[in-house]
Amino acid sequence: MSKYLWSMIAAISLTVAMSSAYADDGMKYPASDEPQQEQPANPSSHAVAHKAMKSADRKLSRDVRKAIASGGAVDMLHLGIVARSGKVTLVGSVPEEGQIDLATQLAQSVSGVTKVANRLSVDVPGGN
């Protein structure tokens, strides 16, 4: 095929891809060039749902942190908790191997946790 034909195919593909990406962006476009009355600023339902989900994720993260801390046997100094839609990820390091399994068990016991991904490692004192 000629370079020209390949260029045309590439241009058409790009146009189609961009059209589909923006086809349902939720924007309302005016039907004419006449000035439109300004609408009151109301958050979209997507924005409200996103905010609620972030709030729920933060609460779940706090609940997991409290559960692990109240277990008493896990050093929380270098332990981070990330929660997203019920999935919890434990990150960081603890001083002993047994604390890794205990932290996982305590996280799994929290209401709302659907899955725990453990990314904890043992922090060797004086290690680099």
Image (tube, rainbow, N blue to C red):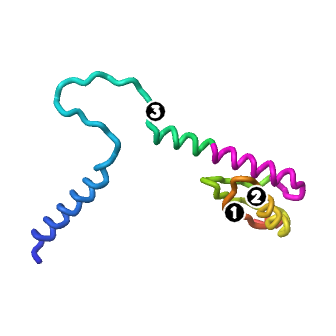
Would you call the spot at circle 3 few (<14 residues within 10 Å), some (14-19), or many (20 or more)? few
Residue annotated with mark 1: 116
For the C terminus, the quadrant is bottom right
Instruction: From the viewer's perspective, tell me whether residue 104 is left or right of residue 86.
Output: right
Residue range corresponding to the magenta coloring: 56-76
Residue at the disc numbered 2 = 107
Q: Measuring 73% from the left and 53% from the top, which residue is drawn there? A: 111
Give the mark, 1 or 3, whose residue is nearer the N terminus.
3
Residue matched to label 3: 43
Residue 10 coordinates in the image, percent (x, y): 19, 65
Would residue 45 be seen by someone viewing this image from the given angle? Answer: yes
Decide which of 5, 62 is in the foreground and name it: 62
Q: Earlier in the sequence, mark 2 or mark 1?
A: 2
Evaluate if marks 2 and 1 touch, with contact meaning CB atoms under 8 Å apart: yes
Q: Amino acid at mark 1?
A: Val
Task: Check the image and report above or below for 95 versus 112.
Answer: below
